[in-house]
Image (cartoon, rainbow, N blue to C red):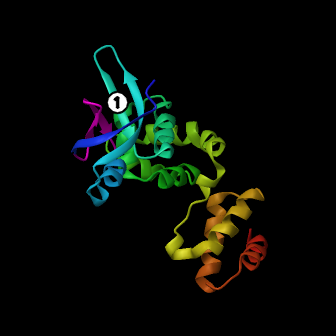
Amino acid sequence: MIDYIKGTITELNPTYVVVDNHGMGYMVNISLSTYDSLNKNGQKEALIYVYEAIREDAHLLYGFASKKEREAFMLLISVSGVGPNIARMILSSMSVDEFNQAIAGNNVAMFKSVKGVGAKTAQRIIVDLKDKIKLADDTLLIQSDKSATGEHFDEALAALVMLGFSQQASQKVLKSLFAKDSSLSVEQAIKLALKMM
C-alpha cells in the first residue's frame, strides 16, 4: 500500500491534484480541505497522504494534506453505505475537528446537510463512529471555538469530559458561564459548572 506521495504539483483543482514523482504523474482525488492546504501560497511541492481504493474497474488514489484527515476518511468508509466519494464530500463540507465535534454532539443535521447523505446514513455514521472517534483521540472531541471562548473554556471543557460529563452538556453550561463572565479562571469555571450539572 502507498502511504504517501511526495513530489511536484503539476496540476491542482478542487477535486484532484496531479503530483509528479520522478517523472511519474499520480492523479489523486482530494477534498476541498486538502485543496485549500495545497493551494496556500501557490506551493509547488507537496507531501500527500494516500488511501488506495482498488476496484475491478479502477485503481483510485485519495489524498489528504494530513494523517488526521486520512484517518477520518478511513473511519467514514468503514460505515456501511458510505463510499469514498461520499466520505470525500463530507470532508469537503467540514474540517476534521468539525467532523469529530458533529459525532460527539450527535449532530445529525450537520451530516444531512452534505449532498448525498440522508437521515439514515447520517445516524449510522454517528452510531458507528462514536466509540471509534473516542478511541482514536479523546482530544479531538474537545475542540471548540477558540476565538469565542478562549483557552480557559477548552481546559474547563476537557476537565468536565474527563470527569464523566457529556461534552454537549458541559459545553452548554460553560458557554452560559463564560457569557456572563469571560474572565473566569479554569478552576472557577469548573467549580461553577459542577454546581449546574
Report how many numbered discs are placed on residues in the image.
1
The 10 Å Cα crowd at callout 1, few under 14, some 14 to 19, many 20 or more, is: some
Residue 117 visible? The answer is no
Residue 187: name its quadrant. bottom right
> Which element carries disc 1, helix, strand or loop?
strand
The percent position of residue 188, horizontal first and vertical second, equals 75, 79
Give yes or no for residue 27 being in the magenta stretch: yes
Residue 156: name its quadrant. bottom right
Q: Residue at x 33, y 41 (%)?
A: 30
Foreground pick, 40 / 96: 40
Please give the range of residues in magenta: 13-31
Figure check: 102 above or below 83: below
Q: Is residue 158 left or right of residue 19?
A: right
Give yes or no for residue 104 being in the magenta stretch: no
What kind of residue is marked 1? Leu
Q: Residue at x 64, y 45 (%)?
A: 134
Figure check: 175 above or below 3: below
Q: Which residue is mark 1?
A: 61
Q: Please, which residue is most extreme toward the top here? A: 56
Figure check: 142 above or below 46: below
Q: Please, which residue is most extreme toward the front here? A: 22
Residue 97 visible? The answer is yes
Foreground pick, 112 / 17: 17
